[in-house]
Amino acid sequence: MKGKDKNQLSWREAFRLNGRAFRLIYKKYPQMIFSRFVSTVWDALTPYISIYLSALIIGELAGARDVERLRELVLVTLCAEALLALANAILIKWKNYVNAGSNYKWKKFYEEKLLDMDFIDVDDSRTHDLYYKIEQFRYGGGWGLMRVLLIFEKLVSALFIILGGIVLTVSLFTSRVPKASGAYMLLNHPFFLLAMVAVMFATIYLSPALTAKADRYWVKNSDARQAGNRIFCFKLAFMTYKGDLASDVRIYRQDRFMEKYDGDKSGIFYSNGLFAKYAARAGGLYYAASAAVSVAFMGIAYAFVCLKAWAGAFAIGEVTQYIASITKVSVGVSSLVGAMGDIRNNAPFLKENFRFLDIPNTMYQGSLTVEKRKDRDYEVEFKNVSFRYPGSDTWALKNINMKFRIGQRLAVVGRNGSGKTTFIKLLCRLYDPTEGEILLNGINIRKYNYRDYMSIFSVVFQDFRLFAFPLGQNVAAGMDYDKERAEDCLVKAGLGGKLKSMPEGLETHLYKDFSDNGVDISGGEAQKIAIARALYKNSPFIVLDEPTAALDPIAEAEIYSKFSEIVKDKTAIYISHRLSSCRFCDDIAVFDKGQIVQQGSHENLVADVGGKYYELWQAQAQYYT
Ligand code: ADP
């Protein structure tokens, strides 16, 4: 007996998972399913019309040879074939139309989930690993959700092929060998019907079962295959293809990392490797056996049909009809069993798909609306807030207490890893505090509607992203935008000069991905665009996380000199390493190891010679004095 495969799920579970996936696809893309159903049924049944008609013609040719009747038959056949071809063309067109962009459509299931997910999960590397794994399943063998549609087609096709074939073979068993044929009369015995059906099912079952067994080696080794795919993608995409890495790869000769894989002849891609081994041994053997079994069955079918015809049960026309129909039924049963195997083999992949799609939204969603105050009178308070990242046992923030009011300029300073960015992420409710609470105008921020709450913040994160869309759309984060406002924000962010030089103004594409006229922008320019985007959103709070790290000293000075004008009546929170640039802030919070160790104005803080701020200030001042 075979050893139990740890990846294999029970039939029940396999049907449940595939059924659930099918319903999911049907709910989203009913037309896709419907079009495939119709064209599959069509594909399955129409060959029988040709088989039946050509059997009639052959029968006539070998039998009565009535010219009038022959002419009639040929005409009917020609017309039928022409109509079938025409209808088929229309069906294919419809199916292609409904199924267009299917790659994009598949991705939508996951993209929508990712967009809907709590940030805490999106930010979790385990979520990305899982998603990456699911993508690998899809590219490396088409397993997962997409497979369900193919299995559905295979099942429908198999069932209708079998049905059509049975209709055309019933008379093989009902037409009787005449008495005059002597011993051949034995062929009339019902035993032959049973025996034929039994042999058919036994043999037909064996062949696909063997194929499924061979396929199972793929499923069994999905981990190894995934590793293979990763290495392959890494080598191809990461090492050689990714433009922004090419310089590093060359300078540090990082291609040498790949020598390990290239030199190892027992590696997965080579002749002593895992896949080659399976192809040469067990897996390959099962594939070969499966092919042989099908041929054996056809031999038996031919023998039975020919013997019956020889004995005079039916004429030559029917022989072609039966042989062709039995061949098709055997193909139908093969693919039915194959589809069943697929259902089972696909189940573990679907399980991973659902593990991803079922990630729950655990973040509490309040319903209070954030009052859109004209006076922008908002007050935010952190009360005893502590935070640990999921899966981490160290506190990223510990006992944070602070309050800031509208119109304040707050600077947050501290060394790398002291918790500044985490502080901002909590403020924007990308994460909820592990302990303590954050209040907006006295109410816990969890009680507000999430989107509403988010709308009062504009943040320029360090790792912001711009898209290869037109500049104006990037600034507005949308397709339609107010041109004047976008321009004004760009000018305020210090990009006025660059904007003037752009060939199509706000309509100029960033980067060259989508337009030959696109412009490449420097890191500093990108940062200015990100600042302009934050201004365009025009929220009461503006948060700048190291906003000038990529700017040259002149651009940086320019931004600071205009900071008040840029920020206007907004509450600004400003994270920076460069203490000299924090001087214009009303209040400075000094973070150290997740805690606020000092708070006050620059003058007060720098006067405290034993304090952290003084230490940081001194460390930097030596470069300026
Ligand atoms: P800063 O912005 O001051 O450089 P951060 O707020 O980014 O500091 O980081 C504070 C601490 O939290 C650091 O120890 C950092 O390693 C940790 N940290 C930051 N992001 C994550 C994360 N996504 N998962 C786990 N730990 C994190």
Image (tube, rainbow, N blue to C red):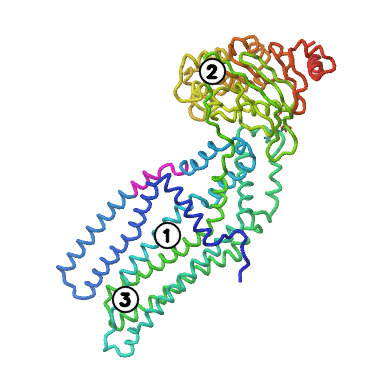
User: Helix or strand or loop: what does disc 3 sit on?
Assistant: helix
Task: Check disc 3 and report the residue beneath it.
Answer: 172
Magenta-span inclusion, residue 93: yes
Distance from the alpha carbon under mark 2 to that under mark 1: 56 Å
Task: Count residues near mark 1 (Cα–Cα under 10 Å), then give few for <14, some for 14-19, many for 20+.
Answer: many
Q: Residue 84's quadrant in the figure?
A: bottom left
Q: Is residue 500 visible?
A: no
x 53%, y 58%: residue: 13
Q: Is residue 259 visible?
A: yes
Looking at the rendered structure, the kind of residue marked 2 is Asn
Q: Counting residues from the N terminus, which is met first, the one under dot 3 or under dot 1?
A: 1
For the residues carrying marks 2 and 1, which lies nearer the camera in this image? 2
* CB-based contact (under 8 Å), mark 3 and mark 1: no
Q: Residue furthest right?
A: 610
Depicted 302 relative to depicted 346: above or below: below
Q: Is mark 2 within 8 Å of ligand 1?
A: no
Q: Residue furthest front?
A: 442
State which region is magenta.
Answer: 92-103
Helix, strand or loop under label 1: helix
Report x, y in % for residue 236: 60, 42
Query: What amino acid type is highlighted by mark number 1?
Result: Leu
Q: Is residue 487 above or below residue 326?
A: above
Sooner in the amino-acid sequence: mark 2 or mark 1: 1
Left or right of 484, for residue 161 = left
Q: Which residue is mark 1?
A: 155
x, y percentage for residue 518?
51, 24
